[in-house]
Image (cartoon, rainbow, N blue to C red):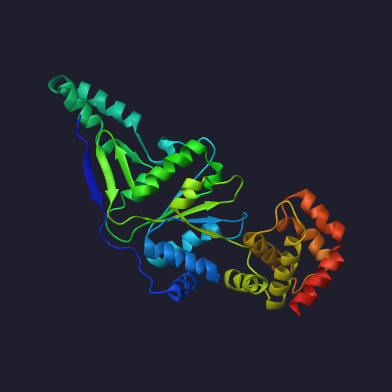
Amino acid sequence: MQEPTSQVLGSQPAVQPAGVEDVRAGLEANGYLPDEGLCTAVFLALRLQRPLLLEGEAGVGKTEVAKALARWTGGRLIRLQCYEGIDVAQAVYEWDYSRQLLHLRTAEAVGRAGALDADQLEDELYSEKFLVRRPLLQAVDHGDGPPPILLIDEVDRADDEFEAFLLEILSDYSVTVPELGTFRSTVPPICLVTSNRTRDVHDALKRRCLYHWVEHPDYEREVAIVTLKAPGVPPKLAREVAAATEAMRAMGLYKPPGIAETLDWAQALTLMGATGIDAATVDVTLGTVLKYREDQDRVRANGLEALVEQATRREG
């Protein structure tokens, strides 16, 4: 078996914005409208080469930050979707056992197996040819070019044990494959970790990362987002939809609508020919913005006419 070796990968530095305004311009040019706090957090993460932990309710645009960063920097977006039970084989690497077995049978069929000693045959089986790189190893072993954007999505869904393992990876961006050696990047990937806070992320991981809580956008920014992402929506409708969504978020709903739901609702109303909202139209399209019956019942109980009136006043 081969002795472990250290493989240093990547040499091109990460993007180095001169200031917070550079980050704002870069994200806005790539379809993301950030607030001042997020721009500052991203700027510091890029300059300090530290992971950035983004927490916030589902639908506030955490994942979209990584996508916009990838478009801006030119780095590949590598996404690790966390879930309960995720382990090293799904997150870091595994061996392609079916191909290894086929290789072994082929060697036996052509008579090579008998000509090789056990160590030589094992070295062939445990070569990079049969290594399946999962997201974390892909991010470390990124080679030349811009560093990738490593998105560790919804880390709060993973088990405590995996979170502890993740902390070890993020400490020095290295992965050891016993049969091959240690892969280590000279320039780390740009790492974003997201959490919907279904459970608390451990303090050790938070200390390793910079931190930013992502709020729902305010009214003006949400109008700008709808205008940018759904240019076919009439301006008056965009403003009223943003105002109505803002009002619904203040009702203490089980799942307040996110930006994606606002966009869905605005586009659905546009398809129905609406240029503004009214109680009847809101009633029949509520399922595009609220995905739980209890939340729809609460909004209806508060009065759809009142919601429309509040949105119209806000829009005006």
Examine the image and state in which quarter residue 300 appears.
bottom right
For this orientation, the residue located farthest to the bottom is: 316
Residue 234 versus residue 212 in the image, above or below: below
| Depth order, front residue of 47/146 | 47
Is residue 172 shown to the viewer in this render? yes
Residue sitting at the far top = 114
Q: Nearer the viewer, residue 63 or 210?
A: 210
Q: Residue at x 68, y 77 (%)?
A: 235
From the viewer's perspective, tell me whether residue 189 is left or right of residue 41.
left
Q: Is residue 209 left or right of residue 269?
A: left
Q: Give the percent coordinates (x, y) of residue 157.
A: 56, 43
Residue drawn at (21%, 25%) of the image: 107
Instruction: Where is residue 307? Give x, y as percent.
Output: 82, 66
Residue 86 visible in the displayed image: no
Q: Quadrant of the C terminus?
A: bottom right
| Viewer-side residue, 284 vs 38 | 38
| Image position, residue 256 (x, y; %) | 70, 56
Q: Position of residue 1 (x, y in %)?
A: 20, 29
For residue 216, which quarter of the picture? bottom right
Which residue sits at x=76%, y=65%? 247
Give me the residue at 52% from left, 45% from top.
202
